Image: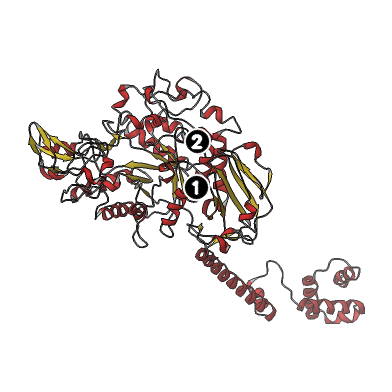
Amino acid sequence: VKVEARSLPMELSEKGGVENNGFVQNEAFEDKETDTSSQEEMPKTCSVDVESVAVEERVLKPYAGMPKEVLLQFSSQARYKVTREILFWLIIAGAIALVCATIAIIALSPKCLDWWQASPIYQIYPRSFKDSNMDGNGDLKGIQEKLDHITYLNIKTVWITSFFKSPLKDLGYGAEDFYDIDPIFGSMRDFENLIAAIHDKGLKLIMDLIPNHTSDKHQWFQLSRNRTGKYTDYYIWQDCTQAAGSVIPPNNWVSVFGNSSWQFDEVRKQCYFHQFGKEQPDLNIRNLAVQQEIQDIIKFWLNKGVDGFSFGAVKFLLEATHLRDEPPVNKSQNGVIITAYSQLYHDYTTTQVGLHDIIRGFRHTMNQFSREPGKYRFMGTDDNEKEDIEATMMYYGTTFIQEADFPFNFNLINMKNLSGNSIFEAVDLWMKNMPAGKWPNWAVGSPNTARISTRIGKEYVNVMNMLLLTLPGTPVTYYGEEIGMENIELEDVSKEHVNSGPVATLPEKSPMQWDGEVNAGFTEGNSSWLPVNSDYQSVNVEIQSTWSNSTLSLYRALTLLRNRELPMSRGWMCYIWNDSDVFVYVRELDGLDRVFMMVLNFGQESTIDLKAIVPNLPSQAVIRLSTHFSNAGKVVDTKLIKTEMGEGLVLEYETAKPVHTMESFQGKCFVAEKACYSMALDLLYVNC
């Protein structure tokens, strides 16, 4: 019986069954020790099989779940050790290559456009944008209600003009309290809710600040006129001569609004200086305590979350201390009483030595709040040096000392006549004088200038918007220009409106036209602070949003093109042609074959052969956008480009020879934030 039991596994093995090596080995070992005599009785074939199994067991192979001792036997073998080392060094080399590639990409990548460069700016006059409480005045809650309109326009930056507490004698630009909101616009809680809503939508907020003067109702002025402590010299006071019941001012200086810039104060018995209205006394900015007050105001609003400031009237901040008479434009008027601002050269009341030290001080404070990533605080200046472009460019600062991110550019507003040549001259004046590496900006409307439709005609609204949104730099749109609003008639401005500011600047501040309902959807009250334009039933946001060929639809298409196409946001601009009717320029980017050419008509019907002007120009181009929407997508012959009065075309074509590389166009091309595009890697880099 014992032999049969021992031979059973042998028989299973011979029949090809499942073999248990451990069982066979143990049985063989036990058999060898206890019963050696039985080996002779065992079949020959069985003994051979047992020895074969024992040999196979001695050749170990790796298997799942092997113990540490077995694992170490294999890990020390050359074939496993070499493989491990190869994999280790491959991982190290790959990690080093990845780090080097990352460093190279960062080093070669151009600086990202900041938020104030990447988006147009939408300027709002708050009293005229949207009324939320039916009192006929626009307010902060009204702006919050209409933030979706801003995002609908593909705009990321909102600029709200002055809303400080004020007697509103000069449209709110003479503040009674820099730390409070005028009740007509709401409360500080309304402002905090507004800025939170703006940031929730991914938008940025710029606000106005005019540090040159205050209202005569300001507490500082009341203390100063009573000679109270440090406030005694917060304003510019001078003794006046009285004769025959009239006051003789210290010199011939004239206010921007006309007549003497000196006003006698019955309380202090001296004259105070005012560059603007008599209700707006100038601060004594040379007084360090006053400078600190302005710095504290800036910090207060930055702590509230404001993303930037437009500093207005900055060229008026300092006056000459010697108080000499300013020279008259017409020398024959010497000794004659001068009452108009334009009759004098303002050598002693504008852009004085030390002005830019003050501006740099503002910049320094702004920078203290710009250290956190993604929290850069924008600074713009509004000086409008119409006749002195070099003085304007000084507000950019120098290569080593920064001032404003840009001074606001009013060249396109200040043009005396409209033509292809005048547009070219306005653009070129800025571009050729702008310091290298600085960023341009453009505006075609403002709260103090007649609207495009009124200033140059309805037929040019669309082409002006096309110009604004295709030039390099940051475009600034005044509310309502996206739908082509017009000024109201001056005779519609009643006497009660005159107290709100200079009557000449009121027609361009009429209420925003939202729909065709009563009061254009601006207010649900019975009336508005200024009359709504009579064309509101056809010129409003609601109706134009449904028309594919409306001014609003074109504006949106242009902002979308600007946001999506690299050549439009940071590429080269090269002048191609200008004459009395048309202005032609291209936008292109190094490394990108796609080019955009703008053909804009500011005169009469015109035909131009662009192929003759640009030899490497393809014979055909596609109309990407047109002021006549039905033309979009059509193919045109570049030898025969026709445009009607006020028509604009954005042509698109591909070329391996961009204009800015051509010898004949050297000196006609400009780039601010230079970048090159790699089609292979689909990224931008700086070393072209």
The quadrant of the image that shows the C terminus is bottom right
Position in image of residue 573 (x %, y %): 53, 54
Between 285 and 77, the residue placed more toward the observer is: 285
The picture quadrant where one finds residue 396 is: bottom left
SS of the residue at dot 2? Answer: loop
Amino acid at pointer 2: Glu
Asked if disc 2 and disc 1 are in contact, CB closer than 8 Å, the reply is: no
Amino acid at pointer 1: Asn
Work out how far the residue at label 2 is from the one at label 1, CA to CA, in angstroms: 25 Å
Tell me: residue 569, above or below residue 53. above
Q: Is 575 left, or right, of 345 in this rendering?
A: right
Identify the coloring: secondary structure
Tell which circle, 2 or 1, labels the residue nearer the N-terminal end: 1
Between 111 and 284, the residue placed more toward the observer is: 284
The picture quadrant where one finds residue 208 is: top left
What crowding class fits label 2: few (fewer than 14 Cα within 10 Å), some (14-19), or many (20 or more)? Answer: many
Q: Is 421 left, or right, of 46 in this rendering?
A: left
What crowding class fits label 1: few (fewer than 14 Cα within 10 Å), some (14-19), or many (20 or more)? Answer: some
SS of the residue at dot 1? Answer: helix
Say which residue label 2 marks: 482
At 55% across and 27% down in the image, what residue appears? Answer: 543
